[in-house]
Every structure is written in C-alpha cells, then in structure tokens.
Image: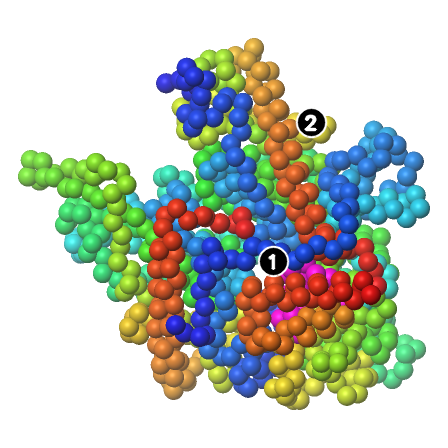
Amino acid sequence: MDLVSDQGLRIDGRRPKELRKIRCKLGVFAQPEGSAYLEQGNTKVLAAVYGPHQVRNRSKALHDAAVVNCQYSMATFSTFERKRRPRGDIKSTEMTLHLKQAMQASIKTELYPYSQIDIYLEVLQADGGNYCACVNAATLALVDAGIPLKEYVIGCTASLGNGDVPLIDVSHLEETMGGSNLTVAVLPLSGQIAVLEMSQKFHVDHLSLVLNEALDGCRRIYEILNDTVKNHLSEIGAISGWGKSDL
Amino acid sequence: MYSVVLSDAEKTFIWDGVEVNLRNDGRKRNDYRPMELETDVVTHASGSARLRLANTDILVGVKAEIDVPSSETPTIGKIEFFIDCSANATPTFEGRGGEDLASEISSALQKAYDILPLNDLCIVPNLSCWKLYVDILILECGGNLYDAVSLAVKSALFNTQIPKVKAKYIDGVNVDLQLSDDLFECWKLDVSKAPCLVTLCKIGEFFVVDPTVEEEACSNGSIVVSVTHKGSITSIFKIGEGSFHRNAICEAIKFAGVIGCELNETLKLSLEKEESLGSQRERYGFLK
Amino acid sequence: MAENICISLAVQRVSSSVPPRGQLCKLFSPGEIIFPQSDFMRGHGTYPEDDVLKASVAGVMEQIGRLISIKPLKSRYNGEVGDVVVGRILEVTQKRWKVDTNSRLDSILLLSSVNLPGGELRRRSAEDEQMMRKYLIEGDLISAEVQSIYADGSLSLHTRSFTYGKLSQGILIKVCPALIKRSKTHFHNLPCGASIILGKNGFVWISPTTADSNSSGGFAQNLDQKVGKADREVIARLRNCVLALATNKIPLYSTSILHAFEESEKYLVSELLNPESMLDIAILTQHKIQMTEDL
C-alpha cells in the first residue's frame, strides 16, 4: 500500500512535509529539578531531570566532568499490545544508550566535576518516533532544570514513501508499513548530528534527500520548543520580577 | 524504598502535633489532602485515570484482553495488577529500585479486589474470558501511595470500555468469538462494589489518614484496610516494621470503615460528575 | 459529601495565574548568540564559541561592567560566600560533617568551623573528634553561612556565630532557591508569632519563636518542650502560605510572607492546601506588593 495517496496526503491526513502537532509543557512536577511533558501527535512522553548532585556511586565519579545517567522506560499500557516489562529489555537499553549519547553531546558536563545528572524518560503513549519525542522532552527538562547546554538537542525521523517521496515525523503505522526509517538527533543551530540511525536499507541516492528532510524537521521542531521555553520563562519571570530585585 | 530523613526535633514536632490534632499542614487527623482526578487520559488503553493527591501522582491504564479462564474458576474473568515505580518519581526507583514497593502494593490490591464479582468478564465458561490488565504507574511520591493507587485504579476501571463479543459454537466444541459489528459498542464493568484502600498511619499513640512523606518517616507502622462502599472490610494488612497492640488494631479498623465509606462515596460523586460532562469534554492530562 | 475528603476534577482546575510584574525582558535560550564578539567577560550561563558569546541556559541577561551572565529562573543552589543556608547533615566523618544544602556537591562543615562549648578559640582535640556525634548526627538540621568555596565547587560552611547552629523543633520547606531574595537578614522573628529562616539555598525553616535568642547558637535541642496549639496553628499557616507563594512563583521575603499571612486569615489553615485558595492568596499578595511599591 502506498504511504502517500494520489491527492498527496498521508494515512493520517498529513502532507509529506507536515509535522505532527507538538504540544509541550515545562515544569510539570515539583520534586525533580527539571521536568517536561511532550506530545508529538499521539506519542506522549514525560521527562524528569535530577541534579547535578553528588555522584551516588563514588567509583564512577569523574574528576573533570559530570556523569550523565539516563533511563528510558515505557509504561506497560503505552503500546497497542500490552508490554510485559516497562524496561530492562534490549530495546530500552539501546534507547537508553542512544539518549545518553544525544544528551551528552549538548550538556556542558565539564562544568560539574564529581557530579551526576539523572535524566529519566517515561513513554506514556507510543505512536512512532518515541526516541525523538524523548530527546525533545529531555532537552526541555534540562532547560527547565537550568543545566547549561551548548544548545538544544532535537530529534526527528524521516522516511521514504512511494519510492521517492520523503516523509517527515513518521507515525507508528507508517513505521510498520514503510520500513525504512531514519532517526537523527541534531544540534540544530550548528547543524551537528549527535545520533544517526537507519532502520533499513535506503538507496544511497535517497539518503541525502531523507537526511535533509529530517534535518529540516529538527529545525522546525527547534522553533516550536524554543517558543514554548520563552513563553514559559516570560510567564514565570514576570511574576517574580525577573529575580533581579535584591532587597 | 522512598523515604526522607528527619531530625529528632522534627519528629517530636510532628508527634506532638498529631497528639493535639493539628498536623504540620493544618489538617486534623482524619483529613485528606485535596485530590484531583481525570479519567480517559491514555488513548491506547481501554480505560485510564490519573489521580493527584498533593504531590503523589498516579497514572493507571487498563487493557482488556481475551484469555482462558483458570480451571478452578471457569465462570469468572481475570484481573491482574502491575505496578511500575517510575524513576521520574525518585532516582531510588531507577532500574529495579522500586520493585519491592511495587509488589507490596500490587499484592495488596490483588487481595483487596478478590471480592469484586468478575462474572461479567466471562465470555464462554471454561473457554474464554476477559482478562483486565491494570497497569499502574507511580510518577511522583508525596506519601500515602496505597490510598492514591486504589482510588486511581477504581476510577480507571470505572472508565474501562470492554468491547461486546458474541460467542458462536462451531462444531459443538470450539468457539468462535465475534466482535460486535459496531466497534464502539462497549459495556462497562460495575465497579460500585470495588474497594478503596485506607491507610492508617500510627504516629505516637494516634492514627492519622493520608500521611505525608514526613509523617510516614516518623511512624513505626501503618495498617492498610480495604473498605467497600457499604463499609465492609475485605482485607487488612500491616506495613512497616513496628508492632501494634490488639486494641489499637480494632480501633483502627473501626476508624477505617467510616473513612472508607466516605472515600468511596466522594469518589463515586466525582466520577459521576465527570461522566455527566460527556465524552467531548476537554482532556488536560499533563498540559495544564 | 464528606468534609474531610475532596476529589476535584481536572476540568475544574484553576487556570489563571498571578499577574505579571516588571517589564518584559529579553530572553536567551541555550545556543543563542548574546554578543557577536567575545571581548566581554563570560559569567555563569554563557560560553564562547567561534568568537561569539553564547548562552548556555535559558533566562535573562545580567551585565555588570563587562561581565555578562545569564541567570536561569530555576536551578540547583549555586552557593556564594556569605550566603545564609539551612542544611541537613548527611554523614559524620573524621573532623567534618557532610551537609546537604541542595548544591551540586555535598557541602562540608569542618569541626574547626563550629563553636564548641568553652570558648571560640579553643583548640580542637582528639576528644572533640570523638564527640562529634554528640553535637550533630545524620538527619539533623543546621543553619550556617557559606565560608568559602573549594576548587571543585563544593561549599565550606561555618556556624561560628550565635545566630547559626543546630535547629530544634519546627518545619522545613524546600522551595526553588531562585525564589529566595538576598536581604540584610535571613532570620526573621515575624510579628505573627513565629520565626522563619529563609536559607538562600531554598530551604526555609519555620519554628516557634523562642524567648531567649541565644538558644539556637549551640547544639541544644529541647525535645521535652511541647509547642502549644496556638503556636502550631501560626506555624502551619505560615508553612501553607510559604508554599502558596512558592508554587505560584512569588519571591519569598519577610514582606511577601507577612502579606500572604494577613490575606490568608479568611481561610482555615487546612483550606490553604486547595490550589484555588493558594492562587487566591498569591494574587492578593502580588497585588499588595505592587501597591506598596508604587507608593
């Protein structure tokens, strides 16, 4: 079956270059230093950041940088078929590793020797692009926690429909029907790629096409997240008089 | 397990406060903190609910799947509880850190729900029935997990839509299950008889309901009682390392019966109120 | 319906927020260029790259001379020398206590930085080291001042003043450190009948006002003394007011807390746990602060 109809629409009614609706919020919980909730279409994730704090396992402490500790977990009710375990399987371990890779590319860990930063992600609803939604939510939670970053890390997927039409922000249905799928995590301002993963074969001619599409998606997601951050900041900052008026 | 450390002076302050019936946050011994409820928040589940009690945040998703009834109870369906303590709540839950707490709460729920009649979940005796997977996610801990989890579970079960299924015998032995033509034709489980858990936390010589994390830290034990809407008690167990006198337990159970009735009634009113808003009401989830 | 139990619905949640104060500021977010040249001194929350100065956190810019820094609205406590903090003892080791002050590393309180009975200038002997657990053990709360900052960024505390020392009966509240304003004094005996310590690290301590002001200087804890119900009510009300302000992001200092306390009188103490009444108090307090500032 074609992923793009004759009218140029995808299964869920989007155009090939259209992102799913992103809704997000910073500071959803009180206990962690930073937290965020992010919806990308029907994919919904929660992120929490603890730290920087003293490394719990002293043998792991680094004298010149902070330890970044991630955990990716999926609620057992998050998928269509019930999951038996929320984490600990090979797939979530791999996700954890990739998340750590993406976040480490941006966090200025050198500022916090002997410290540890915990980033926990909980997928509440999985509908494709889980990894990307997690990267985006984790970035927001880190910003909320006031942890210094080189810049945002943004994740986006892209795929190929009908043989040569690049599709952006792939949904679960398209993931399973289409097959080939490219996931990137990018530092959008400098254009650096922190994580790149391809699920199946592409023709080499198509690769740059799909990659460009994913990078373009990252830049657009960056704009959306940055707006959310600024709105959040100006709302809270204005209440407290910008934290400037020392008595 | 999740806990806080307090100094002796802070503990004394809490003990004395409970004694004069004025707790640190101004509540009396039998006051609950305000709660907030929302059902139908997870679209991938047959039913779901989120309950927030002060800082305690519980998300429950129910999934209905077709299963084979167990040979001892061929005419009733199944219900299974699974709890996951998310590391979002506290770093000590990372990895398998929350499993002890999770299994303690899920076994409490399993026992408490023994009395819920599950005959409606049977499709064909001996051959097929519905199995409800009640998956509970603890997202933030602010004390009193048992009560919060049980309220969230009851709300999620109230919200659960189970598809209508017709069973047809083919060749007399095997059964063919057919979903109703209308996919949206569903029925709901009657949860009015489902119990709520009431935790009574013993602080000094007195029992308090809805303890905060700090209060839990200076108590040497709690009694968890499951109570139905009529005030009957379906299970009792003790948590924590301390020990209780017989009289104290009797007193606690009586107290729990009264509180449990009120809890069930309040929850019922809230659920009915939300249902009356219709299925088109706005969902807030974590966005507001 | 029971009075002691309240389950509200998400649709009823209060959505309005406290009115803003002050003008709009230019905001920076991580990666954004602050100045296109790097001849500024880079402070916290900034980093140089390719000859430009960029922001590393989200917040507002502060400029002192040529020093540029970006201040995030929320973060862990970043200690500065002279700050008054409230901390909890984590560990007793030889010659020092480790203290949790909500910093990124555990803080240190040296045995030589506390007042021991028998005079300030006494030498610390081996017996004193063995007695350390007598003074402070794990879980105890102290008020202290940041004395210096070690090379790795951890804080060294001291309690060498009568105002500092072990805290006795009371309630600790943890709020975001950014909400605590620096002021001349962080110890207040409020006219409503309780004392409050606003730790710069976001730990707020509320306790009954004791008649003799020296009592907090040492390590004595009066566990037999029972706090009366009237005092408790004031403390509980203060606690709920502080939380109401903190949840609604209003800075905490003696004036804002007293305003909130006055506005809260129309509610019962336990009613102050409702989000609606918390917001109401926050809005009224904000209004009152603005009125007095305009005068």
**Which residue shows up at 58% across the image and 67% down it?**
C277
Q: Residue furthest top?
A: A205
Horizontal side of residue A178 vs B182, given as left or right: right
Comparing C17 with B164, the one in front is C17
Q: Which residue is mark 2?
A: A192
Q: Callout 1, which amino acid?
A: Gln
**Which residue shows up at 52% across the image and 43% down it?**
A45
Q: Predominant secondary structure in magenta?
A: helix
Comparing B75 with A241, the one in front is A241
Q: Is residue A153 visible?
A: yes
The secondary structure type at the circle numbered 2 is strand
Q: Which mark is residue A31?
A: 1
Horizontal side of residue B216 vs A27, given as left or right: left
- The chain ID associated with circle 1 is A
The color scheme shown is rainbow
Identify whether C251 is placed above or below A217. below
Where residue C160 appears, x then y in whole percent? 86, 74
> On the image, which quarter does residue A111 sit in?
top right
Comparing B65 with C182, the one in front is C182
Where residue B9 appears, x then y in whole percent? 66, 79
Q: Callout 2, which amino acid?
A: Gln
Q: Which mark is residue C224?
A: none
- The chain ID associated with circle 2 is A
Comparing A102 with C183, the one in front is C183
Q: Report the number of numbered marks.
A: 2
- Is residue A73 shown in magenta? no
Horizontal side of residue A78 vs C106, given as left or right: left
> On the image, which quarter does residue C17 sit in?
bottom right
Give, as a single range, the part of the protein colored magenta: C238-253
Quadrant where the N terminus of chain C is found in the figure: bottom left
**Which residue shows up at 73% across the image and 62% down it?**
C251
**Which residue shows up at 62% across the image and 24% down it?**
A215
